[in-house]
Amino acid sequence: MSPPPRQRPRPARSLAGQLFAVQVLIVVLVVAAGAVLAYWLISDRTETSAERQVTSVARAVADAPTTRQAMLSADPTAVLQPYAERVRVDSGVDFVTIMNTHGIRLAHRDPAQIGKPFLGHYLPALAGRTFTETYTGTLGPSVRVVTPVLDDHGTVVAVVSVGLTLQSISEQLTGPVVTLVLVAVSALLLGALGSWLANRRLRRHTHGMGPAELSHLYEYHQATLHSVREGLLLLDRGGTVLLCNDAARELLALDGEVEGRPLGDLGLPEPLCAAIAGQDALRDEVQLTAERVVVVNTSAIGAGPALGTVVTLRDHTELQALSGELDSVRGFADALGAQAHEAANRLHAVVSLIELGRHRQAVEFATAELELAQQLTDRVVGAVSEPVLAALLLGKAAQAAERGVELTLTEDSLIDDSLAGAVGARDLVTLLGNLIDNAMDAAIEGAAESPRPPEVTVTARNGSGELLLRVADTGRGIDPDAVQKVFRRGWSTKHSGRGLGLALVAQTARRNGGTVVAESPAGAGAVLTVRIPLQRTAGVLG
């Protein structure tokens, strides 16, 4: 026998449904309590009003001259009965009873009760006191007032009782109670409708999830935010930070409270803030922070009018450094390929000279190029003991020769062994490689506009506790208005450039505690100088 199928657990009621039930219950209780309180107030006021009515009528009858004069006549009933009935009809009370001091009725709504004892208390009235009581008489339970009739000497000569039956009082409550019930039902329906509309909206926003599901979703959300390696920022439509995960804090070097602050107040580079705040979505755009290279992507939140922006950040620092090294190696390879091609041409020329019997000319032709190359190699090796920097200079020299640029290392250049370990090899490649590349591009552009051959002059030395890297070119120079902008991300004189090289130079210099300065002497191209304090850098690294 197969086991009975397991029953599927009933789905938990959604948060909106639970809130709706609670709200309806609260509305019902509030309306019911209000209705009970209102009924109690109406009933109390109706009874108080009834007591005041019968009291005023009873005193009016007791003080009337007709009543006192009738008590002096031989047949009081003949006068009092029509008078009491007329007062009863005019005042709207249920009965007006007049009795003598022995409690025998002299006037009553039912003539058959005249001459019979009064049903109720009247002795306090004989003592001259007016009182109110609820008593069951011939007309049923009633609220009555009993008051004495005094003659001119203050002697009690009769007693008057005026009252309203409880049934009559209840009939007076019927109208207000019906109105109260209608108001209560209307309030209940309106409250239920409002709760339903509010919870319908809440259900739409919570996607019908229950409290447990929302709690789990929040826990998953928090765990995901703090575990992903990508930086994540959430901004509202005004640019205020709503959320910043741990990776974003690390990539952007943010300290303290971030949520609730405008993006522009976080101390981030202006180009990065402008790119994030722009209308267009970013796709894998490279931006610079104070110490890192980051890849930025942005996307609008929500359909239609954007609720804000989600920003993702990926660390691109190491990859950018490797990319720079790769570009340098590719440049070296291209230069070596070009040199190999030229060497083959020169070798063919030497072979041809030998075949023509011009051995001396062949030797001179072969050694002339070697002497020039060896002179540059000896100059670099003799002045620069840092192997990475020396290799970079030799490679850039070959690349410059291939592009028709004369690259010169100044006589005062000297890099000794004290640089070892003070500045990282990748930082050296980033600094000097980008400076030389920028200078060669500028010199070539300047040569296209003037007869002066393109030249690049490099100065590299470490002395007096600092590393000095200076690169000068014979290009057009830098516009004075743009001197402060050349190291910003995106600035470039090339139409197809991304303006990243000099920005990386500035970032690397700042990261090592140094400075970078751009100058443009009149008619002398541009001069870019990097200064890095070696003692501070070594202390940081150590």
Image (cartoon, grey):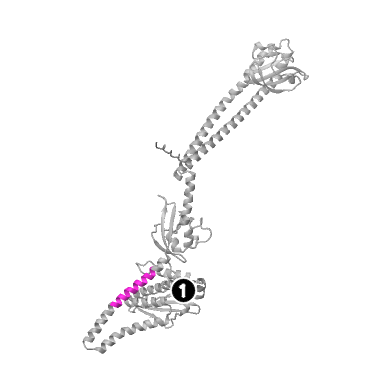
- Determine whether 284 is above or below 15 in the image: below
Q: Report which quarter residue 8 is drawn in.
A: top left
Residue type beneath disc 1: Val
Seen from this angle, which residue lies furthest front?
1
**Relative to residue 304, is residue 176 drawn left or right?**
right
The residue to which callout 1 is attached is 423
Q: Position of residue 375 (x, y in %)?
A: 36, 84
**Relative to residue 5, is residue 28 drawn left or right?**
right
Report the magenta stretch's main SS: helix
- Identified at 58% across, 31% down, the residue is 36
Q: Report which quarter residue 68 is drawn in.
A: top right
Q: Position of residue 406 (x, y in %)?
A: 35, 79
Q: Which residues are magenta?
A: 323-340
**Most foreground residue, 72 or 125:** 125
Residue 128 magenta-drawn?
A: no
Q: Report which quarter residue 275 is drawn in.
A: bottom left
